[in-house]
Every structure is written in C-alpha cells, then in structure tokens.
Amino acid sequence: MLPLFLGSIIYNKRREMNLTQIELANDICTQNTISKIEKHNTAPTVNILIKICLKLDLTLNDIFSDFSNGSSAKDESILDAIEHDVLLKSIAEVEDRLSTLKGKLTDNDMKQYELIKGAMDYLKGDFDVSLFNLDKVLQYTKSANDDIYTLLSYLFKGLNYLGQSHNDRAQYYFQMINDSVDEDSKIPNANDLEVLFICKTLAESFNSMKLYKRSYDFSQCGLRFAQKRNTSYFLDELNLSAAVSIKDDVEKKSEYQDYYNLAYYLAKANKNETLLDSMDKN
C-alpha cells in the first residue's frame, strides 16, 4: 500500500512542469491510469512509479519521506539525526556535531553516541578504535538482543573484521544478529532505517563472502519489510544484492534480470550515482 498523498505529489509536480496527463502517461501507462493515481483511486505498480518519478524528476525519498521513520519509538533528537546521516554515509561535520553533545548526554544516550563513534571509526578504516567503541555500546546495552544498538554493534563489529579479511569472525557476529532477529521480531527502539540498514548490509556482506543463499534471504527480508512499512531506504541496494546472489543460478536468469533492472531504475530514480557507477563497471 502506497502513501495516500502519492496522487497529490504526482498531480502537483506534473502541473509544476506544465505536463498534461497524456504527456506524463506517454511511454509509461494510459492517461486513465494517471487520472486514477492522482485521484487516489489506484496505486501504481513499482515499475510505473519509477518511470513516473524519472519523468517528473522526483526521488523515491520525495515520495516516501513522511513514512521513513514510522517505527521509531522515540522523538527525533540530535543523536537520531546524526545516526540517520551516518547510516546513509552522509558524514560531513558529524564529528563537530558530536562534540557539541559532550557532557549533555544521559546514560541511555551513551549507547547511541558510542555506536555513532564506532561507525565513524569503521568508515575511516580505524578498525581497532571502532571495535573498542562498539564494545562500550555492548556494555551499555548489556548485550540485550532486543536492543537495536546491540544488533548494530554486532553488525559493525562484523564489518570491521570483514574489512580485515577475518571472515570467520565477521560471520560470528553476523550470525549473532541472525539468531536474534526474524521478520516478525519486534525491536522496541528500532526505526525503519536501522532495520533496513541491517538487512542490506548483511545481504551485501554475505555476497562478498560468497554466501549467496544467506545474502538472498536477507535481501528478501529487507524488500518485504520496506514494502510493508512503505519506505524507500536501500531499495536499489537490496534489489542489486538479490540479483548478485542468484547471478550464477542458470534456473533464475529471468529473476536475476528483473532484480538487476529494478535496481538500476531505482538507483536512477533515487539519484544514487555511487551505485550506478558500480553497476556500470560490472
């Protein structure tokens, strides 16, 4: 189910670009379909939605932005905003923003603060420092498996070891997440971005370790979760991981092509130049 205001977004953007319904529908669908979408009488398929977004110069975040943090159990805070940027690899000025919080955080805030520091150290390649900060997170959470910061700590610890080619250690922490979470698990302090970040990162990591069945499973888990939650985080990466995981399966050539094409058009619709460049090189 797509957001109820989707038709209004498309209507307003179409009018802003001085397009008629017939002009927008050209090479996408029928004029009647556009009319029904704008009147909230029907929801477009994903393929039609992507083509509309490309034609109207809309990103998927423009469509889904109001739904991106629907599962969050807490009000937006400075730490939440910083963590959001780090998970999306928008890390400019993160350290300066963190420095303004010193001495102002509660004990409960510290697990999130140390998680952000550990993630930043990982992104900078400071693996030992990252692992040290992530261990601090686990001290604050007492390694409780129903705490998202425990699971994110396991994830980044696994990534640190993967970055050092210690695949066995990486698998150990990834398995800790797998043992703690399934599709129906409820993580009270998790938001949609965090859940999908875990799914897409595990899918990518398992592909890099040539554990294709596990990669496929996590990509599917993420795609189902995103559809259920009406959010667009990492849809392009999740589809690409699904494609890569079945690329060499001769019985799934058609399915592979569908996932790959969808990843490509989603990346274009969401202006994910990094992913597009990587796909062009391969």
Image (cartoon, grey):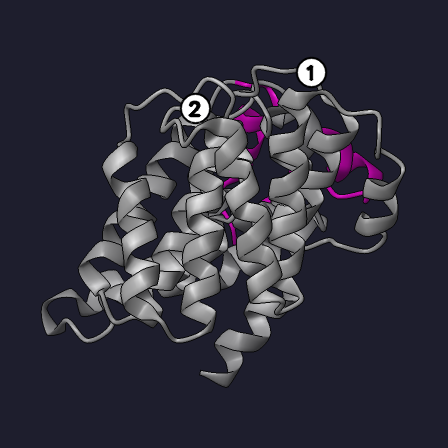
Q: Position of residue 27 (x, y in %)?
A: 53, 55
Identify the main secondary structure in magenta: helix
Residue 43, labelled with which disc? none
Instruction: Judge by depth and name the residue closer to the eye, 179 or 238.
Output: 179
Quarter containing the C terminus: bottom left
Q: Which residue is mark 1?
A: 75
Residue type beneath disc 2 = Met
Residue in the picture at 22% in, 64% down? 212
- Local packing at callout 2 (Cα closer than 10 Å; few below 14, some 14-19, many 20+) is few
Q: Which residues are magenta?
A: 11-40
Residue type beneath disc 1 = Asp
Work out whether 256 lies above or below 68.
Answer: below
Residue in the picture at 61% in, 59% down? 129
Secondary structure at badge 2 equals loop
Q: Position of residue 68 (x, y in %)?
A: 59, 30
Instruction: Judge by depth and name the residue closer to the eye, 80 or 196.
Output: 80
Instruction: Judge by depth and name the residue closer to the eye, 53 or 203.
Output: 203
Please state if 59 lies on the left or on the right of 48 as rendered. Answer: right
Q: Is residue 37 magenta?
A: yes
- Local packing at callout 1 (Cα closer than 10 Å; few below 14, some 14-19, many 20+) is few
Q: Residue furthest left?
A: 251
The quadrant where residue 70 appears: top right
Q: Is residue 88 visible?
A: no
Please state if 103 lies on the left or on the right of 36 as rendered. Answer: right
Residue 1, labelled with which disc? 2
Q: Residue furthest bottom?
A: 281
Q: Is residue 107 visible?
A: yes
Quarter containing the N terminus: top left
